[in-house]
Amino acid sequence: MADTDNATAAGTVESAAARSALHIGQGATPETTTATREAQGGAGGLPQFQFQHWAGQIGYLLVLFFILYLLMSRVFAPRIRRVFDERSRTIEEALAAARKVQAEASAQAEEARKALADARARAQRTAAEAKARAEAEAKARNAQLEAELNARLAEAEARIRASRDSAMANVAAIAGDIAEAIVDKLTGLAAPREAVDQAVAKLQG
Amino acid sequence: MAEPSGPIQPIHQFEITKLVDFGRVNLPVFGPTDLAFTNSHLAMTIAFLLIVLFMTAVTANMKVVPGRLQAAGESLFGMIDGLAESIIGHEGRRYFPFVFTVFSFILAMNLLGLLLTFTVTSQLAITAAFGVLTILLVLVVGFARNGLGFFKLFVPSGVPIVLLPVIVLIEFVSFLLRPITLALRLFGNMLGGHVALSVFASFVVALGVYAGHGGASLLVGAPGAALSMVMVVALTALEVLVAFLQAFVFAVLTCIYLNDVVNLGHGH
């Protein structure tokens, strides 16, 4: 116990001497300068070359480094990696979902386009059919009307022909009568009816 | 302690101060060693606790859509993750915890150095420990994965047989230098930056005191102190960048060295 105390005291004295020597610099007495040299392991100059402090610092650094390494590799790095992985997974999932929705939307748009085209085609077909039907009806009505008109025309013509025929027949009788009357007036003779009719028929040709 | 009128002592900030002393022992490699809880230990502890606190806060209540803090933690994580994956390839994930621990620890200690009075990464002992640790991991992974094929690392393919001895020697020496360059790069950057900061900061004080004498010294001292102050602000901004950059560079080099042995024979 006493030994340690002595050593501690000696160490404190030495380092204090070294410190004061450094502070005083040029003004140091020869004794303190040698003491400093000794304390600095004979290197002099920079405090970094006081080798009596090396082992303590290095040992402590290695202990801290080892603990830090364990913490990094076992605790911190896995935690951050997990979040990185989770993040990339989330992004991938969101992208996949977006891609799916987009595909669905374009499929629906395609469907809608097809439905529209169908409807248009159907409408056009219906319109064409209606037109054709209307045309056919109109034609049929026309034909019927024409037939009716033709029939009436033919009837009218027949009637005209009949009345003309009858009129013509009357004309022959009238012509006969007139010819008979003219012969009577001119000659005073009664002309035979048959001869007159024959002459009229000849003239009629 | 630092009296304004005294000589400029830019290296005082690197002094190890014992807070709790445990005495002195004689260790095999390190020689006589003071066992103590020093200001360096304290700064390391704060850095360690800050990282644990930060990572706990980031990962405690993680959401798929991150908040601000979680986004900050995730961007650091993602940056190193992307680095390991792009350099080492698919197996980068296995080495990611090591790279990220190195990166976050160095970054925390660098940044704390700008806020506290002590910068752990300006201690060569610490940077050397990081460098040796990294190279030891490279060696372990190299031998575990490739066995004696590890030595193919020193024999690049497609080299003329005449040049081979020279090339192998160069490759071997460059491999040996890796932990040293790793340690010295970080150490040098932190040391230099903090010395420069300290020098300009003491200029502010010294010139300010000088200007306080009045008269002609005011004409010299006041603008000088103001200029030095501007330099301190600018250098502090630069040091923030350097603090991040050096941690990042250490992580990149760790990845590159690991890649050499993980993908030995099919990357060269």
Image: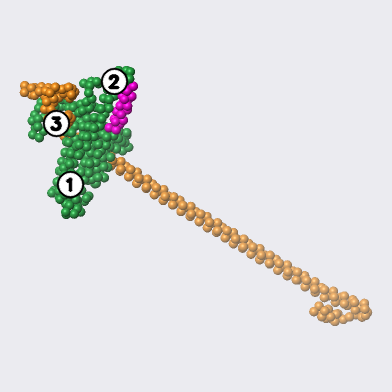
Chain colours: A orange, B green
Residue at coordinates 6% horizontally, 23% vertically from top-left?
A3
Give the residue type at disc 1. Glu
* Residue topped by disc 2: B210
Q: Quadrant of the C terminus of chain A?
A: bottom right
Indicate the position of residue B222 as horizontal and vertical percent values: 32, 22
Label 1 SS: helix
Q: Are marks 1 and 2 in contact (CB under 8 Å)?
A: no
Residue at coordinates 39% horizontally, 49% vertically from top-left?
A103
Q: Crowding near pointer 2: few (<14 within 10 Å), some, many (20+)?
A: some
Label 2 SS: helix
Q: Which mark identifies residue A43? A: 3
Q: Which mark identifies residue B171? A: 1
Cα separation between marks 3 and 2: 35 Å
Residue B115 at least partly seen = no
Q: Main secondary structure of the magenta part?
A: helix
Give the residue type at disc 2. Tyr
| Chain letter for the residue marked with disc 2 in the picture | B
| Chain letter for the residue marked with disc 1 in the picture | B
The stretch drawn in magenta includes residue B234 = yes
Q: Is residue A83 above or below residue A117?
A: above
